[in-house]
Image: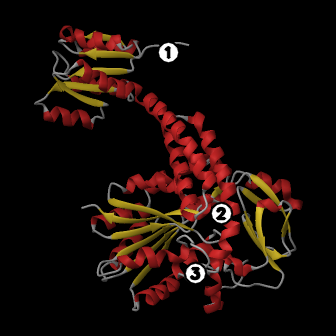
Amino acid sequence: MRRAPKRILWVDDEIDLLRPHLLFLRQRGYQVDGITNGDDALTLLRTHAYDLVLLDEHMPGRRGLEVLQLIRRDDPHARVVMVTKSDEDGTMTEAIGRQVEDYLVKPTSPRQVLSVVTRILEGSTIRQQRAARDFATQWPALTRMREQAASPRDFARVYRDLVDWHLRLESAGETGLLDTVEALQDDLRHDFGRWIVRSYPGWMRGQGTRPELSVDLVERRLLPLLGREPVLFVILDCMRFDQWRAISPLLGDYFDVHESYHYSILPTATPYARNAIFSGLFPDRIAATRPEWWTSHHDEGSMNVHEEELLREQLRRLAGREVPVHYEKVFTDLKSEQVQGRIRAATRQRGTVVALVFNFVDLMTHGRAESPILMEVAKDAAALRQLTRSWFERSTVFAVLKEAAAAGRRVVFTTDHGSIHCRRPATVYARRGASPNLRYKFGGNLRVRDRNSALATARLSDLRLPGSRPGTTCLIALDDYFFVYPTKLREYQRRYRNSFLHGGISPEEMIVPVAVLRPRG
């Protein structure tokens, strides 16, 4: 079906002199009406729908800015381009302040006008078509890269490329190709899981070339920044790469962002991955040196209460001296001013490392499975990204980062693990006393019905996990599976299907961002 032409209203007291411009636009398929004054334009706009208004500033009667104000009152979303003389800097500033779509300076050529009109009226369609063409061009290479991925760098590159393509196509409105991207992501997730099952035990034994892991972050990212000036070490718990992509443009206004990635250790859960970050040690080593800090795999609430001590010890070990540390764990933004005040006080000491953990994203991810309202608000990955960005813009962490940028302080910004949108249940058989987690479990003689749904091992040393009671088995979910018991199959499926969970093996959980932020200027 043929699309109706876009309608343009051009308001200018010298409209007769602009006939060549109007004709040029009509020849390009636009329906253009010309009118000589603001009052008639307002009357026409109230009875006819126009896609764009070209509005001259200097006209008899109402001036263009006054007409613009009345147009905005009747239709706040009307798209308007101001047209005026080159010497009117004040008019240009005021028009831009009133959020006009663009600004043209007389004299204008027909080609200049067409360029502005095309960008405003056809820009989204052009971007959509461009994104579709670019993806079609790159799709064979992406498929080949996914099929040939065999190293940590290969898998990280493919995963990050697919995240970027998903976001670009989504932003361009090219939703028809999102299924293709998601199919590639499913294939990558499957290949990644089997590769991790084969490779991870070797990494733990020091074999082969392993990626940068949770245990390496402080030594490789934070240590080189230590000096006379304070440094911030910020961890946003449970942040996926696509969530990072949603908030990183906000940081670009204040920092030069040097983005990279690291691999979360297994299980991809806070007690393991975040303790590994702060200590620089794998869980078995933490348990060996501080057995009183590591009670059992079932008591996770008490397993992250020593992060400050672990960080102090690691910095002392790496730097060969005592490094001042100020540590905060922030669960809510209700006391933002107090948090910022304590950080300001801490940064008065030379060489301080200000370590900050923000738990909102993790709390939101966990709470989503328990709250029908939150499940509806964050019903998919796109909604979760939008919710994360909306929170971040008004959060304590962003306020702290902006203040750090103003003070010229560098920041290491990262996360401990990501999360995955779980859709498939995997039935688990366990004795009483097995851990309750949905993406990983510890227990006596655990087994899973579908062996392709999980890594199963009784050799906890393969994962550098501390030994437990004899006969203990560890299960770590692959792909987008979540564990259910046969006696609670329906209850678990109803409650947890389509939840964002973590602890398992997937690119979304393991390949996570780390960025060094250097203040602009």
Tell me if residue 154 comes above or below residue 99 in the rendering: below
Tell me if residue 90 comes above or below residue 74 in the rendering: below
Q: Residues under labels 2 and 1: Cα distance?
A: 47 Å
**Camera sees residue 325:** yes
Q: Which mark is residue 3?
A: 1
* Discs 1/3, front: 1
SS for callout 3: loop
Circle 2 packing at 10 Å, graded few (<14), some (14-19), many (20+), is many
x, y percent for residue 356 = 46, 72
x, y percent for residue 191 = 68, 57
Q: Residues under labels 1 and 3: Cα distance?
A: 62 Å
- The kind of residue on which mark 1 rests is Arg
Residue pointed to by mark 3: 305
The quarter of the image holding the C terminus is bottom left
473 or 333: nearer the viewer: 473
Q: Earlier in the sequence, mark 2 or mark 1?
A: 1
- The kind of residue on which mark 2 rests is His
63 or 218: nearer the viewer: 218
Q: Earlier in the sequence, mark 1 or mark 3?
A: 1
The quarter of the image holding the N terminus is top right
Q: Is residue 422 left or right of residue 363?
A: right
SS for callout 1: loop
Residue pointed to by mark 2: 502
Residue at 38% in and 76% down: 342
Q: Is residue 369 left or right of residue 87?
A: right
Residue at 64% in and 53% down: 188
191 or 228: nearer the viewer: 191
* Discs 2/3, front: 2
Q: Going by the picture, which residue comes out furthest to the left? A: 87
- The kind of residue on which mark 3 rests is Val
Q: Earlier in the sequence, mark 2 or mark 3?
A: 3
